């Protein structure tokens, strides 16, 4: 049985110097069949493979690095060569309501120091 979800936010900044802030909202809604919500307490240096459980293809995700983490973490997707760095206090958000040809099916977190990473995955 599918469960409804939505991912919403806004990116707010002035279009040009001296202009007022303008909102650029975004949202996605859809249905998911599987979820994974690990809270990772990472110590020292290493690589942690995020458990996807029964998620076959990622539809939405938010990965947050706690402000108390001692260094950025690197996110690798599907073992690929295009890593994403997320600093303490930052996050990575993803939305793909109909994953097709090359869906995200694996994420690993590389850390060089202690970090806390909250992972929310829907598929």
Image (tube, rainbow, N blue to C red):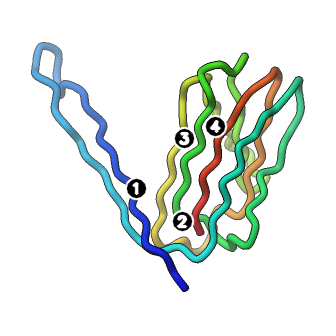
Residue at the (25%, 32%) spot, across then down = 12
Mark pair 1, 2: CA separation: 11 Å
- Which residue has dot 1 on it? 7
Mark pair 4, 1: CA separation: 20 Å
Q: Quadrant of the C terminus?
A: bottom right
Q: Residue furthest left?
A: 19
Q: Residue furthest top?
A: 18
Q: Position of residue 115 (x, y in %)?
A: 74, 27
Secondary structure category for the residue under label 3: strand
Disc number placed over residue 84 in the picture, else none: 4
Mark pair 2, 4: CA separation: 18 Å
Q: Residue furthest bottom?
A: 1
In the rendered structure, are the residues bearing label 4 and label 3 in contact, judged by CB atoms less than 8 Å apart? yes
Sequence order check, earlier mark of 4 and 3:
4
Q: Position of residue 45 (x, y in %)?
A: 88, 26
Is disc 4 surrounded by few (<14), some (14 to 19) or many (20+) residues within 10 Å? few
Residue 87 occupies quadrant: top right
- Which residue has dot 2 on it? 59
Disc number placed over residue 92 in the picture, else none: 3
Secondary structure category for the residue under label 1: strand
Number of marks in the rendered image: 4
- Please state if 113 lies on the left or on the right of 8 as rendered: right
Sequence order check, earlier mark of 1 and 3:
1
């Amino acid at each position: 049985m599918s469960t409804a979800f939505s991912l919403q936010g806004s990116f707010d900044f002035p279009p040009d110097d001296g202009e007022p802030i303008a909102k650029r909202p975004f949202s996605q809604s859809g249905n998911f069949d599987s979820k994974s919500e690990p809270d990772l307490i990472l110590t020292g240096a290493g690589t942690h493979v995020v458990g996807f459980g029964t998620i076959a293809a990622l539809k939405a995700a938010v990965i947050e690095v706690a402000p108390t983490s001692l260094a950025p973490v690197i996110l690798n997707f599907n073992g690929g060569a295009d890593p994403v760095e997320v600093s303490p206090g930052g996050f990575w958000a993803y939305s793909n309501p109909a994953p097709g040809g090359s869906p995200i099916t694996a994420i690993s977190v590389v850390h060089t120091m202690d970090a806390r990473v909250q992972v929310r995955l829907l598929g």
